[in-house]
Amino acid sequence: MHNRSQKGSIFAMTVIILTVSVIIATTMATMVLRSTYTARRLLRSTQAYFLAEAGVEMAIRDYYDNGFTSTGTPYNCTYPKNDVPLGDGTFSVSLDTTHYASREEVLIISTSTIGNVGSGGATRTIRVLVQDTTIPAFLFPALGGGKVIVAGGSEIWGDVHSNSSLNGTFFWQERALRIGGYLFPWNTGDIHLISGDPNSGYATAVGGIRITSLGTVDSGVTLGSQPAVPLPPLDSDFFQWYYEQADSASPRQVYTGNQSWSNVTLTPSNGVIYVKGNVHLEGTVNIVGCLVAEGDINIGTNIWPDANVSQTQVGRLPGMMSRYGHILMMDPATINGMVYAQDDLTILSLLGKLGPVTINGAVYAQGGMFLHERTQITYVMPNPPGLSEETPLKVMCWDE
């Protein structure tokens, strides 16, 4: 009896131990599975977060590169952007441009999705409130501190402002003046301010606006007075940044005294040429980067063309800048980026049929501005490095 009882006890103990072992093993397996599932969900959630953040960064980059429009969206950009693929998922970005417009703020909303949300996937939404801090002058393709004269035949795709007076005038050729909107066929015999879009094509001035007796104004163009717009704050610190870029280049790109270049290609390693004097360009000149002169910049000198200048923008660098002098373009040229003159800026291609002066960027002059026929300006908002405030926006709130 004693042996039988002992055997029964051993059997019962074995069953208990096996049962406990199975329970422990099952529990551990469940914990491992749950831990694996949790880790996978955490991984997916983290991936979704960075994917949503990528959507926010894309919108901020669009603002950074293009600036705001009056409706709060970046220039030349379309929103919302839906189901943008990136890595293992997608993100969608929308802009709330109405609820915060009175404070010049926009809410960026980015939602991402990784995998199937119901089967181990994840979704995250990030909301970021940004405020427009664009320098007001940079909202204009053409802005003059003094009198601005735009002759018939010029094409300016955007708004024009003068802190003095603005004249649209007939000069030499009977062609149409275009401010804003879309390209129209040439019109002869009239000076037209033309806009293909009723929301664009503003011609404003602190003083009077005069259209010659031949002139007409299309209904899409708004003429009117406006308070003075401060010119870009390009101070000594700003120009010092460009001097240091040229000074640190290899080979060094700082030139002392007046410089005259003809039939050359200039490719500074740091993207900046800095001249402590005047610059004269003639013949075929190719510039890859930004040309800065402390004095005047002259392209050509005679009525008969002797120059053809092509400038390629490097990053966000301006095209040409005169720190203390004027800029005069007598001959065909293509400039990409901001053009700035501390004094007057004159584009006077009298024999413009041989080639226009084309600027893909914007033109600013602390003095007066004369844009002769065959001047073509396609607006690209400047955001030059070296400014104390380089970005056109400020992040006000970030909600994850």
Image (cartoon, helix red, strand yellow):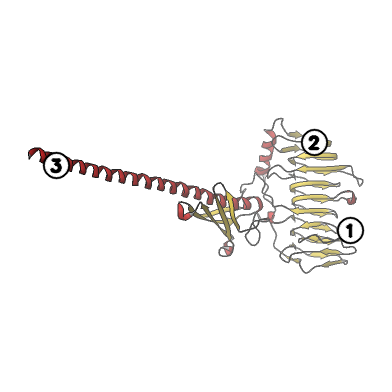
Foreground of the two, 205 or 290: 290
Q: Contact (CB < 8 A) between labels 1 and 2? A: no
Outermost residue toward the top in this view = 251
Residue 400 visible in image: no
Q: Contact (CB < 8 A) between labels 3 and 1? A: no
Residue for point 82% across, 35% down: 264
Image-quadrant location for residue 200: bottom right
Residues under labels 3 and 2: Cα distance? 101 Å
Residue for point 46% across, 53% down: 119
- Measured from the top left, where is residue 153 in percent x and y? 85, 57
What amino acid is found at the position of numbered circle 2 in the picture?
Thr
Q: Mark 3 points at which residue?
A: 8
Disc number for residue 171: 1
What amino acid is found at the position of numbered circle 1 in the picture?
Phe
Disc number for residue 265: 2
- Measured from the top left, where is residue 400 in percent x and y? 48, 54
What amino acid is found at the position of numbered circle 3 in the picture?
Gly
* Dot 2: element: strand
- Measured from the top left, where is residue 160 in percent x and y? 75, 59
Disc 3 or 2, which lies upstream in sequence? 3
* Dot 1: element: loop
Residues under labels 3 and 1: Cα distance? 119 Å
- Judged left or right of residue 71, residue 206 is right
147 up-or-down from 243: above or below: below
